[in-house]
Image (cartoon, helix red, strand yellow):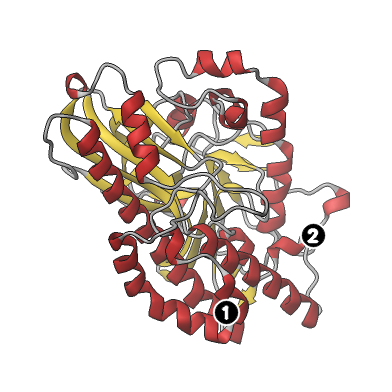
Amino acid sequence: MTLHSHDRSYEFLAQRLDAAHAAGGNAVPVKMWTRGVPVDEKAAQQLLKTAHLPFIFKWMAVMPDVHHGLGSTIGSVIPTKGAIIPAAVGVDIGCGMMAVRTSLNARDLPDNLSGVRSALEKAVPHGRTVGRGHARDKGAWGELPPASAEAWRALEGGFKAIAEKHPRVAKANTANHLGTLGTGNHFLEVCLDQENRVWLMLHSGSRGVGNQIGQYFIELAKKDMARWYINLPDQDLSYFPEGTEHFADYVEAVEWAQSFAMMNRQVMMDHAIAAFRKAVPKPFEASLEAVNCHHNYVVREHHFGENVLITRKGAVRAAKGVMGIIPGSMGAKSFIVRGRGNVESFCSCSHGAGRVMSRTEAKRRFTLADHARDTAGVECRKDADVIDETPKAYKDIDAVMAAQADLVEIVHTLRQVVCVKG
């Protein structure tokens, strides 16, 4: 796929599709902040398919962490008028980041951080119990703690209203996932900034209930396309036109799931701070600086004089002055950033480094020795089950940040010293 460079901070993806993937109509431009970082062919093809949809507003914006995704391209910003694409939001609705700065300095931490890691692992359920015969999932609460119960009371009414109209979503994990981490690339970390100040940072979303809502409405959109005889270049681009019954129901459900995700991160952070207080002998203040942001969501915003729907699939809002978080990998630095309000990107930035290879390829290519070397100095898992998250499975975070220098300014540079993975 050819990329054409211009005297701008972004590039244009060539507006063509292979004959086998031809889609009718004209495609909108695809503006890419990808100079100096790789863009795989599958992601390029996926972006162009989306660009051919008739309701895309002006152009698509592509972040430097872009890579092929299930349903829609990760690292893309999709503005739409009159329609919404459930698979573009995906199944980890409201996935995002939270970080807080404490009053601690690196010298206040114990020399051996294994106790800190253990305390965090006990405070926050993580991972998942696979198979039958288990009393409960280790990644869910057995007995609901007070903070999770209180958070659920604020969310329960909205969920019941959704479940009454769509009973299939009622079977999802709900309260017992509030304040839990999950699996895959979700994490909880202790980090140091450029002044050796201590931060807590985490990455998670709407957990089981968001997954259930996402899957259900993705399938419902596909059924609507079949019922209306709408042909698409990819069924995962099935959409709900605004004004239809399922459009309104999906907006209600996705907004609720995004609220769940935001609350999940807050409850988890509260538990992590409490555990951290017990593991570190020195009293400290928390939340001196705090950021809680989505990077997998849909929202109504005003751009170029019009009200539009913005779907950020692995992208963070970077309006002028708005704070965000761009994490690296298990062994790479992360960034607290401030948005520059670049209108060409619909005021967005990347959500991380972005994968450079699949999980399967990472497991095939890298050894435990590779992983141990690349996470040296970090108190974290060094076993075979996290090889798919090893640092070299991701793009170079410095190159990613350089490619989007006109989207955000770096406020703090963090390096992790403890990492809890699901």
Helix or strand or loop: what does disc 1 sit on? helix
In depth, the one of 16 and 263 nearer the eye is: 263
Earlier in the chain: of badge 1 and badge 2, it is 2
For the N terminus, give its image quadrant.
top right
Kindly report the distance in space between the C-alpha atoms of the residues bearing marks 1 and 2: 24 Å
Question: Hey, what amino acid is under mark 2?
Answer: Ala
Q: Are marks 1 and 2 in contact (CB under 8 Å)?
A: no
In depth, the one of 294 and 406 nearer the eye is: 294
* Badge 2: residue crowd in 10 Å (few <14, some 14–19, many ≥20): many
Helix or strand or loop: what does disc 2 sit on? loop
In depth, the one of 97 and 77 nearer the eye is: 97
Q: Which mark is residue 397?
A: none
Q: Is residue 57 visible?
A: yes
Q: Which residue is mark 1?
A: 247
- Where residue 259 sits: x, y (%)? 39, 66
Question: Is 303 above or below relative to 111?
Answer: below
Q: Is residue 325 visible?
A: no
- Where residue 120 sits: x, y (%)? 35, 38
- Where residue 296 sits: x, y (%)? 49, 55
* Residue 413 quadrant: top left
Question: Hey, what amino acid is under mark 1?
Answer: Phe
Q: Is residue 80 left or right of residue 71?
A: left
- Where residue 236 sits: x, y (%)? 71, 61
Q: Which mark is residue 23?
A: 2
Residue beneath the point at 73% across and 42% down: 42
Circle nearer the viewer, 1 or 2:
1
* Residue 412 quadrant: top left
Residue beneath the point at 68% across and 43% down: 43
Residue beneath the point at 45% across and 48% down: 181
Q: Is residue 32 left or right of residue 327?
A: right
